[in-house]
Image: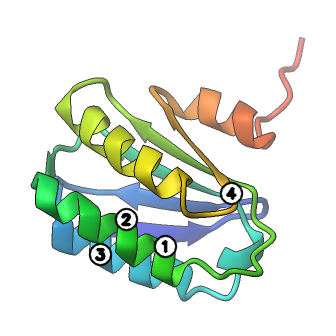
Amino acid sequence: MYNICKLTDHLLVEFQDNFDYSTIKGIIHHETMMKEYPYTNDIWLIGSHHADIRLGELENMVKDFQCRCPIDATRTKTALVAKQGLTQVILEIWMNAVQKKVTFELRMFNNLDDAKVWLKIAQPQVA
């Protein structure tokens, strides 16, 4: 399962368990239908959850995402946060294919803090 939170400066898709193609398809549909999606950057917090996605399903994931992304969107970034391993590699393959078909940038991170810095939503450090 997953949860999508509307935060003040971004959307947070938080994975709560291992996932498969149907879960990703549901996330894509759910998030892209949100009224905030076209103008709000997002973070997919996958963590150490594992992906059960076949190579053939990756193509469908790319098409699903491309078809559901608004053409006139002003959003600029999507950050994916996953532990290193096979799941991260699978998502990087998907992300690289999607990047060629959408107008915003996607990037993979190993930790949430780096993703927030890239999205420019990191909390300032107090000395």
Mark seen at residue 66:
1
Reading the image, the residue beneath label 3 is 25
Q: Is residue 124 left or right of residue 51?
A: right
Question: In what element is the residue under mark 4?
Answer: loop
Residue at x 37% of width, y 65% of height? 62
Mark seen at residue 62:
2
Among numbered discs 1 and 4, the one appearing first in the sequence: 1
Q: Amino acid at mark 3?
A: Lys
Among numbered discs 3 and 2, the one appearing first in the sequence: 3
Residue at x 18% of width, y 58% of height? 19
- Quarter residue 5 falls in: bottom right
Q: Is residue 28 left or right of residue 112?
A: left
How far across and down, in percent of the image, does residue 58 sit?
24, 58
Q: Amino acid at mark 2?
A: Val
Among numbered discs 2 and 4, the one appearing first in the sequence: 2
Crowdedness of circle 4 by 10 Å Cα count: few (<14), some, many (20+)?
A: some
Distance in Å between CA atoms under marks 1 and 2: 6 Å
- Quarter residue 16 falls in: bottom left
Reading the image, the residue beneath label 4 is 104
How far across and down, in percent of the image, does residue 55 sit?
14, 52
Toward the viewer: 91 or 44? 91
Q: Are marks 3 and 2 in contact (CB under 8 Å)?
A: no
Q: Are marks 1 and 2 in contact (CB under 8 Å)?
A: yes
